[in-house]
DNA sequence: CCCTTACGTTCCACCAGGTGGAATGGCATC
DNA sequence: GATGCCATTCCACCTGGTGGAACGTAAGGG
């Protein structure tokens, strides 16, 4: 079944597989098969190609495959992160250095938010391995909810209209506009967003707030943590204010960078 | 003409093309054709695929193609385990070839360290079972103690907080913060960590040191030996310095691999 | 200890996808 | 207007890529 009619199928599959591999420290054939929907013999053949070319390594004792250093040459020519990411980078790195927990910066991309920067590589205790370019839903994920709750009323209305047409399971709540608006009002009241408790993995959680400028949401910033490591009081009284201060500092840097 | 007999040809060509694209701010079809040796129709077809999937952009006004932000998904997983294991592998294999004793590389995984690479299969004196993917405690095992003793103060504090909530027998000492910190101070003073003498197997021992970078512990490296084969003087005066040098070499390789 | 389950790997018949030379189109230069 | 150069499209050809089935191995449970 072709992914897109004007793509080279084998190439598309290989790239999707490599993206999935980047999400894990080590990934088995079974994990890659489930995540991509490709038959196992196809996964094996494509992974062998990636290993032969130096993009991946397979150590059977480790239990699977992992990315190798050659993958850097597939992206090292890209230098076009959004302004808000440039502004956020030093603040986010300093935060993770001081508090250990990883941060993510996400921006709106059609009807989801997309992670454009993360301090996961600099955190010793990250629940995730590679989240760059992940799409996160607006109604079930912390980074998305923080966007939808704090964006202008007109924008929220339009986004909810678009979400109502979606067939994604995580967008289902958009079909019940009243409940969706009530959820978002609760997020605004609380002052920060959290991942829906029904969404996996349940061993971790995220708190997220908007990065605001001129009444608009430029991006959202979220801190992810292991639920076994932080009790709710510590989370709400200690970390939420820190993430809010971080967001304000980032917004300030965006303003500075915008001056000619 | 196939690149390699065990690769998916179309995938290999696409990746080579993408690497070449990364070398240019903008690249024309002709440039890509000359650099890769692929026929122009092949280059066009593969570039169309890359554009359709979001890895490249075509702007005729700019004079060709350039990489797009999605390429970051192809490399963002190269940090932590994959990075440290790739950096450590050649150094560790050379060490075991020269000194025979097996080595293990371990990284932090929540509140324990996990062995991610081991030279046991390459050691002529490896009566030890394979240890890859084993979790080792932070307070009773050499590889764990090396991590906890030499990591930054803030991180140690947080890890001890998390360990205090653990019900694992080997984490019990975390309940007595003062004694735990005294143990770790002693490890730092000694310059290397050892397994708790009460922990089995007593016929063997491990010496471990941190792999440091920018004031943080990336991983720990440990050498396991038979206690009947080495006296303490030989261990401390001969092998500990060798393992420390090994760790410094690995750290250097990590820095090199981190460059874009 | 044996059976079952789950996962990784190999095989191979099948055919659809990928190939590249030739032709075409567009643009700049003289 | 002719020429040269580069990008793109076309399409006959055939080989590379596919995926279900079979096999091998290891782990877990009774």
Image (cartoon, coloured by chain):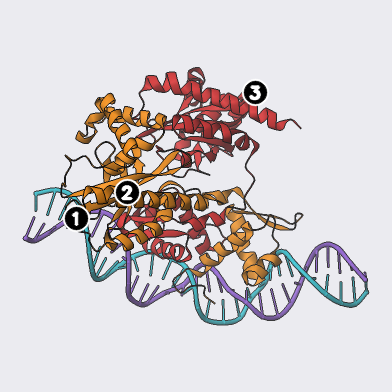
Chain colours: A red, B orange, C purple, D cyan
Residue C7 placed where, x, y %?
30, 56
Residue under disc 2 on the same chain as residue under disc 3: no
Q: Are marks 2 and 3 in contact (CB under 8 Å)?
A: no
Frontmost residue, A205 versus A179:
A205
Residue under disc 1 on the same chain as residue under disc 2: yes
- Tell which tag, 1 or 3, sits nearer the viewer: 1
Q: Residues within 10 Å of mark 3 (few under 14, many from 20)?
A: few
Secondary element at tag 2? helix
Q: Please say if B190 is above or below B55.
A: above
Q: Are marks 1 and 2 in contact (CB under 8 Å)?
A: no
Q: CA distance from mark 1 to mark 3?
A: 71 Å
Q: Mark 1 — on which chain does it sit?
A: B
Q: Is residue B227 left or right of residue A195?
A: left
Q: Please say if B82 is above or below D3.
A: above
Secondary element at tag 1? loop
Q: Which labelled disc corresponds to residue A215?
A: 3
Q: Please say if A239 is above or below B58.
A: above
Which quarter of the figure is the C terminus of chain A placed in? top right
Residue B121 visible to the viewer: yes
Q: Mark 3 — on which chain does it sit?
A: A
Which residue in the structure is indicated by mark 1?
B229
Which residue in the structure is indicated by mark 2?
B240
């Amino acid at each position: 079944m072709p992914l897109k009619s004007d793509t080279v199928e084998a190439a598309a599959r290989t790239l999707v597989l490599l993206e999935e591999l980047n999400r894990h420290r080590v990934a088995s054939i079974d994990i890659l098969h489930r995540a991509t929907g490709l038959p196992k013999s196809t996964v094996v053949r494509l992974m062998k190609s990636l290993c032969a070319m130096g993009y991946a390594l397979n150590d059977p004792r480790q239990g699977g495959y992992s990315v190798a250093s050659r993958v850097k040459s597939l992206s090292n020519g890209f230098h076009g992160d959004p302004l808000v990411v440039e502004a956020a980078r030093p603040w986010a790195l300093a935060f993770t250095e001081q508090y250990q927990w990883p941060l993510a910066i996400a921006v709106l991309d059609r009807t989801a938010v997309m992670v454009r920067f993360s301090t996961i590589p600099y955190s010793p205790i990250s629940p995730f391995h590679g989240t760059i370019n992940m799409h996160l839903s607006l109604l079930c994920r912390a980074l998305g909810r923080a966007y939808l709750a704090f964006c202008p009323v007109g924008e929220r209305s339009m986004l909810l209209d678009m979400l109502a047409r979606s067939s994604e399971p995580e967008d289902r709540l958009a079909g019940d506009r009243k409940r969706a608006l009530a959820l978002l009002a609760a997020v605004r009241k609380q002052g920060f967003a959290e991942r829906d408790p029904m969404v996996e993995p349940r061993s971790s959680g995220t708190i997220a707030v908007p990065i605001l400028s001129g009444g608009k949401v430029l991006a959202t910033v979220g801190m992810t943590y292991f639920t076994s490591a932080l009790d709710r009081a510590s989370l709400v009284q200690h970390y939420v204010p820190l993430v809010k201060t971080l967001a304000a500092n980032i917004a300030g840097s965006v303003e500075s960078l915008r001056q000619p």
